[in-house]
Amino acid sequence: MQYPETSGSSLLEIAEQTLQTEILPHVSERTRAQALMIASAMRMVAREIAQSAKITEAGSALLAACGCEFSAGVVAAIRRGAYDADGTIHAVLWFDAAVRTSISKPSFLSERERMLVGLPP
Amino acid sequence: MTPDQRAAFATWVAPKLDAEVRVEAVKLLSGGAIQENWRVDVRIGTSPLKLVVRKTGRTGLAGSRSADVEFRILQTAYRAGVLVPEPIALCDDPTILGRPFTVTAFVQGIAFGPRVVKDVSLGGHREMLLEQLGRELAKLHLIKPSTTTIPGLPAPDAHPSDAEIERLRHDLDAVCAVRPGLEWGLRWAELNAPKRQSWVLAHRDFRTGNYMVDSDGLRAILDWEFAGWSDPMSDIGWFCAECWRFSRPDLEAGGIGSREAFYRGYTSVTSRPVDEEAVRFWEIVAHLRWAVIALQQGTRHISGAEPSLALALTGRISSELELAVLRSTAPAQWN
C-alpha cells in the first residue's frame, strides 16, 4: 500500500505560506520581525531539502579535485599555497559556494550560477 | 533594569555628572547584535538628561573590545573632533548592572542601515552626507599609533593586511569552521596585499548602519567596539563594500551615493590620497571578514550559549559572502 504524504520540502512550503497569509497580517510590529525570520528560515530549509543532491555533488567534487578525504585537508592545502590561482580548484569552490547560496539567498545568484546549480532562470 | 539596578546606577553616575540624579525612564534600544544598549532618562535637579547605557553582551565576538578599551577609543575620537556621542563615564564594576558598561550622551536619529539607504528623506542631501562621512573618517585617521597611546590597545607591529589575515584564520579555527572558499580568499589576500600600507586609528565597522542621521544630516558615528589600529583604506573598503549597500548595490558608497563624494570629503581633511587599488583589495577582505563574523554569530547560537533565530540566520549569510569573494578572486586576479 502507498500512503500519499506531502514531502518535507513541500510541507515546509505550505507551512510558510500559512504563516505569511494567516498569521503575519495579525501580529504586532515587534512580533512581525520574528515571524518574518521564521518564514525565512522555513524557506531556507525547504530549499536545503530540495538541493540536497547538489550539496552532496559539490562536496564530492571538491574532495575529488583536491584528492582529499576530508574538507580539513582541503583547507590545509589551500593555506599552504598548494592551489594558488588553480582554475580547477577555483571552479569547484565556486560551485560549492553557489549551491549553498542557492539555499540561503538564491536571489544573489547570477543567471550563470543559477544554471550551474540547476535552478530555473 | 530592575528598581535596585536603577537606584545603584543613579548612585554610581551622580558623581560623574556632579549632581544628584534620579532615573525616570529606561528603554531597551533596538539594534546591537552583540552589545545591549539602553536609553536612560534621568533628571538632574529640574533638568532632564538623556543617556545611553551600553552593557557588554552576554556572549561576545572575538575582536570585540572590552568596555574600557572601547570607551577610551571613543574618548580619543571625541577629543580629536570626530562626531561621536559624548563619552561620559565607564563602569567596570559588575555589581551595578550585572556587567561592565559605558555611559554616553543620547543622540536622536535613525541608524538602521536598510532604512537609511531606502528613506531618502533621511540624511539631508546625500552627496553632502557622504562628504561629511568622509571628513569624519579622515579626522579619525589622523590619529596614529606613533603619536597616540590608547591604554589596552597595543601598538601594532605587523603589516595591517597580514595582521587581518592572521586574525581571520585564527577566528575561523576558533569556531571550527572548515570553509575552503574563504581560505582561498584569505590566501589570495595574503599574496595580493597592497605594498604600501600604514597604521591609523580605524573604526573597523564604519558602514551604513553604524552612523546616526536625521532629516538634516549626520548626527553621530556609532558602534566603536571593533575599533583599533589598521590601514586607512580598510575603513574605506568596508564602507564601500557591496555587502554593506543593502537595497542599493548600485550606490557604491554605503548604499547612499557616489564614491567621488565620499572620497572628496575624505581628502579635504587629509593629505593622504585614496588608493583605489588598495580600497578594492580591502573591499574583498571586507567580504571575508563579514563572512567570518557571520560564522561567529552563528556559532553563538549553535554552541547553545545564546539560542537565537537571528544569530542562526546570520551564520547562513556567510555563503553569499564567500561566493562574492570567489567571484572577485578568479585565477586571473592573482599576482
Image (cartoon, coloured by chain):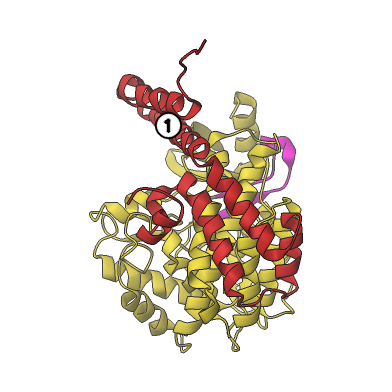
**What percent of the width, then of the height, locates residue B327?**
48, 68
Q: Residue at x 52, y 39 (%)?
A: A48
Name the residue nearer the viewer: A45 or B265: A45
Confirm whether the magenta stretch covers residue B106.
Answer: no
State which quarter of the image contains the N terminus of chain B.
Answer: top right
Chain that is coloured red in the picture = A
Q: Is residue B153 visible?
A: no
Q: Is residue B142 left or right of residue A71?
A: left
Name the residue nearer the viewer: A22 or B45: A22
Confirm whether the magenta stretch covers residue B98.
Answer: yes
Q: Residue at x 38, y 83 (%)?
A: B268
Q: Is residue A90 left or right of residue B127?
A: right
What's the colour of chain B in the image? yellow
Give, as a three-letter code, the residue at label 1. Answer: Ala
Q: Which quadrant of the view contains residue B135?
A: bottom left
Location of mark 1 (residue): A39
Q: Is residue B166 visible?
A: yes
